Image: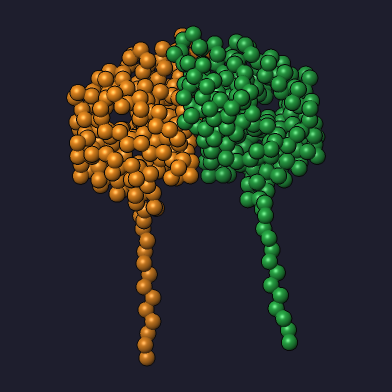
Chain colours: A orange, B green
Amino acid sequence: MSSTVTKTVVVEGVLDANDALAQANREKFDRAGNFVINMMSSPGAGKTTLLERTLERLGDRIRIGVMEGDVQTTLDADRLERFNIPIAQVNTDPGFGGECHLDANMVRYGLPGLPLDDIDVLIIENVGNLVCPAEFKVGEDSRVMVFSVTEGEDKPLKYPLMFRSVELVLINKSDLLPHLEVDLDALNRNLDAVNPGVERILLSARTGEGVDEWCSWLESHARSGAVPLVK
Amino acid sequence: MSSTVTKTVVVEGVLDANDALAQANREKFDRAGNFVINMMSSPGAGKTTLLERTLERLGDRIRIGVMEGDVQTTLDADRLERFNIPIAQVNTDPGFGGECHLDANMVRYGLPGLPLDDIDVLIIENVGNLVCPAEFKVGEDSRVMVFSVTEGEDKPLKYPLMFRSVELVLINKSDLLPHLEVDLDALNRNLDAVNPGVERILLSARTGEGVDEWCSWLESHARSGAVPLVK
């Protein structure tokens, strides 16, 4: 008589496809010693201009690489070309169906274009969007968002997942504050309501106000090494 | 002897699920005589402020209803409450998994909250996002986008599907132009590159500049009746 043994496999902590690929990216970054930032914002909040200011200040001190995520065009990558740094462009439209975000697989496709061993800090400039980019880990150490004061103080409440998922909010376009009715105190209260005590720096990528503070944050985080982001 | 007859069904022009539901919405709008606008933009481009200015000007002449699409909160609907108009709030987070856009099914869920027979113009304020909302018909007659000059002149090239899918671009926050380096001529060229000759109105929902022109557009389109938008 034969007996049938049913073996029960307990499935625990299994990664979904995106998280599995994000972990694979993470392992590549760790081997190369990269500190990786997933930079997110609405369209036109000033990510690329801030990268220009950052490269002007830190380009000689830290080896910075950039991955540009856009639905179409290489306009942002073109703007950074003058810095002679490694740049990989990932367009979500031709290969990935016009996706509104970068996910781990898209980043994985972009990595062969970058000499990771020669990079200290990799900044991944995500597609301009306050919703979906926050839903996809790409293997980053840190999430930073650029928020333009022109967008209004209510946005943390309306797009809480994004604001909750970042560890630093760069409040950009401070030079426009005299011309806006935006309530900075309310913005700070709304940030604390969705992500209590989240670090924030008021800056203007245009005038340079606050940019040194951001560069110090970046330099000190890069020096302290690639500590995996626990979420 | 029996013969087997194979009947070939030729499937042509079958609607996908979203388009089928959009058509069902469309039929409801047609029965009620509604002119329906799908209003789209980035987060913080000024859709709600423009709706306030619009209701101040047209509220006595046209029966306007609003459907507010947001990931979370009823902040926008709250701002319009003082106008005593029919407003339906659709939150994409609790029921629809945090979607970054409205689709035909979400709009369908919101419709029972609106007295369509008592509405001339229904304005559907979509989730703030320059990518995905453009991919989903909701049964609208017309697509209008609000674009803030603070977002930069390159955006039509970077998010072409959105700019291509609309018949009117409201170029908002004109009052900030003296404080920005944005190139309006380049913006116009980029608009024409992706959507040649698309109608555009430069306005400021804050100062009121250009708002009358937009209201005239809206009134004349509402009067000419609900003509299905062919895309």
Can you tell which quarter of the image residue A81 is in? top left
Q: Quadrant of residue A68?
A: top left
Question: Residue placed at 36% from the left, 73% from the top?
Answer: A7
Q: Looking at the image, which residue is at 69% across and 63% down?
A: B9
Quarter of the image for the N terminus of chain A: give it.
bottom left
- The picture places residue A128, in percent across and down from the top left corner, at 45, 31
Q: Quadrant of residue A49?
A: top left
User: From this viewpoint, is residue A74 visible?
Assistant: yes
Residue B5 is situated, as x and y percent measured from the top left of the image, at 71, 75
User: Looking at the image, which residue is at 64% across and 13% down?
Assistant: B210
Q: Against B216, is A69 above or below?
A: below
Q: How many marks?
A: 0
Q: Is residue B125 visible?
A: no
Task: Give coordinates of residue B135: x percent, y percent.
Answer: 57, 40
B165 horizontally vs A102: left or right: right
Q: Quadrant of the C terminus of chain A?
A: top left
Residue at 55%, 13% in the rendered image = B174
> Is A79 situated left or right of A189 in this image?
left
Image vertical order of residue A197 relative to residue B228, above or below? above
In this image, B38 relative to A214: left or right? right
Q: Position of residue A50 (x, y in %)?
A: 35, 22
Query: Outermost residue toward the bottom?
Result: A1
Which one is in front, A49 or B118?
A: A49
